[in-house]
Image (tube, rainbow, N blue to C red):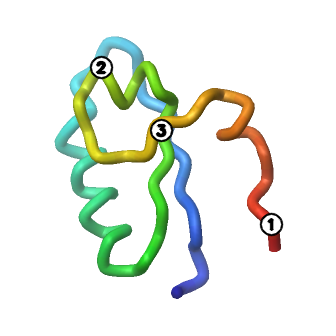
Amino acid sequence: MGFIGTVGLVLHPERTCAPTVEAVVRWSRTRGTKVLGLAAEVARIGCEAIPVEAEEMATPAPT
């Protein structure tokens, strides 16, 4: 795994972010990195990010 283990995405509520999110997800696959997104946003755009609640997004990853 590289330097980045997890990426958290918070999306604009009105813009179409799916192409950008999918580019980040593709990038993450090649590096063994997880991509997290707020559950409602992941559902709204139908992307492959891992849906989480805000509390989990704000919790620091273990080092």
The Cα–Cα distance between marks 3 and 1, rounded to whole angstroms, is 18 Å
Label 2: few (<14), some (14–19) or many (≥20) C-alpha neighbours in 10 Å = few
The numbered mark at residue 37 is 3
State if disc 1 and disc 3 touch (CB < 8 Å): no
State if disc 2 and disc 1 touch (CB < 8 Å): no
On the image, numbered disc 1 is attached to which residue?
62
Between disc 2 and disc 3, whose residue precedes?
A: 3
Q: Quadrant of residue 12?
A: top left
The Cα–Cα distance between marks 2 and 3, rounded to whole angstroms, is 11 Å
Taking the view exactly as shown, the residue that stands out farthest to the bottom is 1
Q: Quadrant of the C terminus?
A: bottom right
Query: Relative to residue 20, is residue 4 depicted above or below?
Result: below
Residue 20's spot in the image, x, y percent? 25, 46
Judge left or right: residue 36 versus residue 25: right
Which residue does the image show at 80% across and 66% down from the upper left? 62
Query: Relative to residue 41, is residue 29 depicted above or below?
Result: below
Q: Quadrant of residue 57?
A: top right
Which residue does the image show at 61% across and 28% down from the upper left? 53
Between disc 3 and disc 1, whose residue precedes?
A: 3
The numbered mark at residue 44 is 2
Label 1: few (<14), some (14–19) or many (≥20) C-alpha neighbours in 10 Å = few
Q: Tally the marks.
A: 3
User: What is the three-letter code of the residue carrying label 1?
Assistant: Pro
Which residue does the image show at 60% across and 82% down from the upper left? 3
The numbered mark at residue 26 is none
Between disc 1 and disc 2, whose residue precedes?
A: 2
* Disc 3 element: strand
Residue 31's spot in the image, x, y percent? 40, 80
User: What is the three-letter code of the residue carrying label 3?
Assistant: Gly
Label 3: few (<14), some (14–19) or many (≥20) C-alpha neighbours in 10 Å = many
Taking the view exactly as shown, the residue that stands out farthest to the left is 19
Which residue does the image show at 55% across and 35% down from the upper left? 52
